[in-house]
Amino acid sequence: MPHSPLRLIVVEDHADTAEGLKKFLKAVGYQVFVATDVASALSLASSVEFDLLLSDIALPDGNGWELLKQLSAEAGFVEHLPKPLSPDKLCAAIERAAAVA
């Protein structure tokens, strides 16, 4: 369980994966917003306050690296997690990233 209710933007173009991540992350106490591509992530990021961005690399209209450059220039890149994601490793990575931010 996170120490604070972190607000996460999850960018994932595979619908089932996005829904699974959203359900899991909400269940462990995070506030989760989901985008399916770079354009919707940029739109979402401009309309909601968020603490961390979790992004897939391959997206239909660009890639996660480009998105990170546009949204996280000040905070920077913290960690890369290969799929399939382990729930414990994902939560630990989120907490490590939050500690850096």
Image (spheres, rainbow, N blue to C red):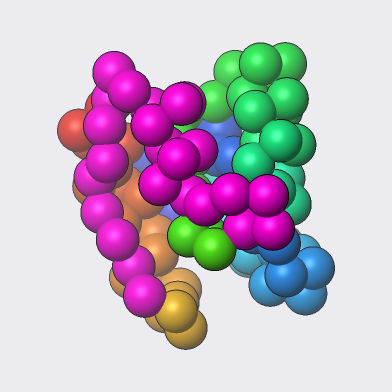
Instruction: Residue at 66% x, 16% y: name it.
Output: 46
Task: Give the quadrant of residue 14.
Answer: bottom right
**Height in image: 5 above or below 18?**
above
Residue 72 place in picture, x, y as percent = 38, 27
Front residue (pair 38, 9): 38
Instruction: Residue at 26% x, 54% y: name it.
Output: 79
Residue 22 place in picture, x, y as percent = 69, 57
Residue 78 place in picture, x, y as percent = 24, 45
**Height in image: 26 above or below 83?**
above
Quadrant location, the C terminus:
top left
Instruction: Residue at 31% x, 36% y: name it.
Output: 98
**For this view, does 35 lie left or right of residue 94?**
right
Residue 10 falls within the magenta-colored stretch: no
Q: Residue furthest bottom?
A: 84
Front residue (pair 4, 85): 85
Task: Give the quadrant of residue 27.
Answer: bottom right
Per the rendered image, the range of residues in magenta is: 59-82
> What is the tally of numbered marks visible in this picture?
0
Q: Residue furthest left?
A: 100
Residue 53 place in picture, x, y as percent = 48, 40
Front residue (pair 60, 99): 60
Q: Is residue 71 visible?
A: yes
